[in-house]
Image (cartoon, grey):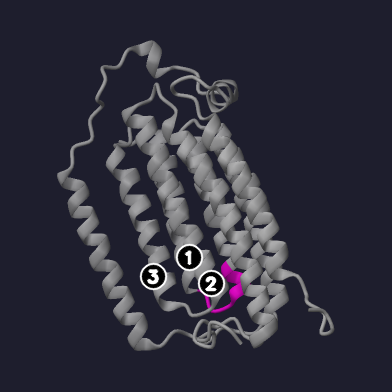
């Protein structure tokens, strides 16, 4: 682990973050956008863990932040999928362009 | 000459990035979910490489076993399987690629300027300190200064609220019901 500098891990997580951003910008399908958000959250997790291991190896704060982010991501994915299924039932489509009314 | 550990890291990173890129550019949403599955598994491998077996296990159980399965279920519920997604508009794709590349370049420049050095002096026994499940569990539920019992309880309330919220949102209302 010590042969790889920290900055290379940060480059990888930055690249993953911007791959997720690209998906979020180009895709109009809600499930695809949710998958892009998952990629973004994972890149943040990599950062937390890498900083913890390289800069403060005797502490565990990065590990706990990662655990809590994973738990919140699970809750977020569940709520988002419930909303998507409800929208599909009402609009017969999960394209964000068709969901332009707050109440129908 | 790179050591075996460095080679493993670069191969894992290449795997994560390539599968992530395929996940956001694939034309078929089901394939996209499978590429996302590979990418998340690669990230779990990265945690193994960083010697954090517990986080890697949580990553596999929650993401690969939970979230991706949930996403695949919702694809089956909302999508005619096998139907290709409409490709993104060329203008939007080009502009987003440009914006993303600029953001990546800017962030890399900022990263190169920062200096990441260890703040505390490292002793050999601290470096090889055990980060096993017992240490994580003891600190997660401790009520002393560096304990995490309050966030732990708050997150359990959040999960309960999310579960109830999902049921309320996704429940099917019968036409006669009020």
The residue wearing badge 1 is A36
Q: Are dots 3 and 2 on a single chain?
A: yes
Residue A5 included in the magenta stretch of the image? no
Asked whether A32 or A98 is in front, the reply is A98
Q: Position of residue B2 (x, y in %)?
A: 33, 36
Q: Which residue is mark 3?
A: A22
Give, as a single range, the part of the protein colored magenta: B26-32
Q: Quadrant of the C terminus of chain A?
A: bottom right
- Chain under numbered label 1: A
Q: Is residue B11 visible?
A: no
Q: Which is nearer the N-term, disc 3 or disc 1? A: 3
Of mark 3 and mark 2, the one earlier in the sequence is: 3
Which residue bears the numbered disc 2?
A32
In the depicted structure, whether residue B122 falls above or below residue B137? above
CA distance separating discs 3 and 2: 11 Å
Disc 2: host chain: A
SS at badge 2:
helix
The x and y percentages for residue A35 are 53, 65
Q: Are marks 3 and 1 in contact (CB under 8 Å)?
A: yes
Under circle 1, the secondary element is helix
Q: Are marks 1 and 2 in contact (CB under 8 Å)?
A: yes
Q: Is residue B29 magenta?
A: yes
């Amino acid at each position: 682990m010590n042969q790889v500098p920290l900055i290379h891990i940060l480059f990888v997580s930055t690249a993953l973050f911007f791959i997720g951003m690209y998906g979020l910008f180009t895709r109009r399908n809600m499930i695809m956008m949710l998958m892009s958000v998952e990629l973004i959250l994972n890149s943040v997790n990599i950062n937390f863990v890498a900083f913890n291991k390289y800069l403060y190896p005797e502490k565990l704060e990065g590990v706990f932040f990662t655990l809590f982010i994973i738990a919140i991501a699970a809750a977020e994915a569940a709520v988002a999928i419930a909303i998507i299924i409800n929208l599909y039932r009402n609009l017969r489509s999960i394209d964000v362009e068709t969901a332009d009314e707050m109440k129908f | 000459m790179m050591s075996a550990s460095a080679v493993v890291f670069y191969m894992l990173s290449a795997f994560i990035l390539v599968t992530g890129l395929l996940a956001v550019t694939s034309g078929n949403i089901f394939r996209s979910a499978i590429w996302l599955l590979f990418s998340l598994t690669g990230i779990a491998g990265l945690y193994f490489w960083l010697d954090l077996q517990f986080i890697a296990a949580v990553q596999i159980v929650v993401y690969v076993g939970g979230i991706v399965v949930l996403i695949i279920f919702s694809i089956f519920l909302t999508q005619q399987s096998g139907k290709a997604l409409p490709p993104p508009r060329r203008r939007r794709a080009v502009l987003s690629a440009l914006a993303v590349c600029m953001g990546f370049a800017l962030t890399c420049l900022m990263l190169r300027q920062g200096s990441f050095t260890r703040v505390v002096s490292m002793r050999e026994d601290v470096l090889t300190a055990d980060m096993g499940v017992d240490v994580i569990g003891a600190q997660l539920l401790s009520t002393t200064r560096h304990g995490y019992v309050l966030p732990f309880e708050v997150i359990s309330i959040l999960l309960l609220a999310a579960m109830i919220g999902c049921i309320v949102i996704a429940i099917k209302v019968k036409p006669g019901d009020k």
